[in-house]
Amino acid sequence: MVTCAGTSGFYSLAGQTIRFDPWVPELQPFLQGSLHCRAYQLPSHFARLKANSPIAQVTGWLADQYQTISLWQDDSGYLLDIPSAGSFWTAADGGTICQVSCSGSTDLTFLAEAFLGPPLILALALRGIWCFHASAIEFEHQMVAFMGESGAGKSTLAVYLAKLPGVRRVSDDILPVMWEDGKLYALPHFPQLKIPQHQQPGLGFPQKLPLMAVYYLDEQPAISIKGLGSGNSALLLAGHTVAARLFDRQLLSNHFSFCGQAAAGISVRGLAYPRQWTELPWVLQALKDDLDSVQASKSV
Amino acid sequence: MQNTDKRITLCANAILQEVEDEAVLLNLNSQHYYALNPSGLRMLQVLTKSDNLEQAAASLLDEYEVDPAVLRSDLQELVDDLLAQGLVEFI
């Protein structure tokens, strides 16, 4: 390792302390401390790594651009090439993320999106933390998450339900979760990039909260909630995990085990509802009734 | 039934996880997931413990009251699906 001038930031994200190099101003609410030096591995190390074929190439949207992310791996960690942002290195222990080269973009918001995308998702996965593509709310000391296809209204439902008395929004788009002691926990301290720094919803909550249920959204004329089979629940959780296509075989296997445990450990339900403001109090009531029935069935 | 004299086994690149009375399978190469309902899981359990498809069908007919032709057809369909997904193989 070598060091050079610059500043690293240590951030508390999803209950983990992770060093970002360079520091990321957009993550200020999560900053724990900074260090006036930067940690790099030798550039020649990355050049050697990149001389090999990538272990994965995944095409998708990142920071409003459709691009192909390439991934290399060795004992030191993962090197990710994000064409519009540069190359990033995620240490094998998930504790450090470095931007090792840049593509020329000076847009800090874009850089933050790149840092918080695949490099951070991998860092957390290496620590057994998986990121659901989900919004979440808390009411009556219970947290539930909303999943759905793109445009299904995950964020909108959380925003509008949080306008009702006693309901607080926990996450907008990404919800880190972990399995511990036979329970699924949500880790709300995670930046939601579409929300201004001073309004980050997760910071008002403890580092770790049990997740009671996941609701899969489906727009329909009438409100109804039904349980999904455990196999389909596991598939749903797997399919709505962010950046899972970047996982290598070991991470895939770990993630697969996690999805099975989570599907057996919590309720995954289908929530059909009309996307109308006047119906939302009834949606909340339906959620409350459903959680009551889920808890009653668990206690039998 | 095709390949009735061969044993079915999970491929090396496939992992299975039982979730309550159902199961999910993952092909580590393609990263595709596959869900099995309780009947599908039971069929796969019996298939992987039997010497061949016909023996598996006979075992399942002892468990389920079902038309033998329907069961054999369902079993073959499951095997074909799992083969197509690269999750099982004949040995």
Image (cartoon, rainbow, N blue to C red):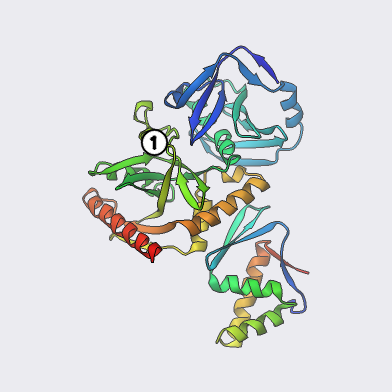
**In screen coordinates, is B25 left or right of A41?**
left
Q: Is residue A107 visible?
A: no
Most extreme residue toward the top is A5
Most extreme residue toward the left is A278
Tell me the residue at 62%/86% (across/down).
B62
Picture quarter with the N terminus of chain A: top right
Tell me the residue at 52%/52% (across/down).
A239
Q: Chain of mark 1?
A: A
Q: Secondary structure at mark 1?
A: helix
Q: Which residue is mark 1?
A: A202
Amino acid type, label 1: Gly
Q: Quadrant of residue A162?
A: top left
Q: Where residue B43 sits: x, y (%)?
A: 62, 74
* Residue nearest the observer in this picture, A296 or B7: A296
Picture quarter with the C terminus of chain A: bottom left
**In screen coordinates, is B62 left or right of A169?**
right
Q: Where residue A159 sits: x, y (%)?
A: 31, 41
Vertical order, B34 against A202 (above or below): below
Tell me the residue at 44%/50% (across/down).
A149
User: How many numbered tags mark residues here?
Assistant: 1
Q: Is residue A241 visible?
A: yes
Vertical order, A147 against A9 (above or below): below
- Give the class, few, some or many, for how many residues have Cα within 10 Å of label 1's Cα (few <14, many ≥20): many
Q: Quadrant of residue B25?
A: bottom right
Q: Where residue A298 sits: x, y (%)?
A: 40, 62
Vertical order, A17 against A163 (above or below): above
* Residue nearest the observer in this picture, B59 or A140: A140
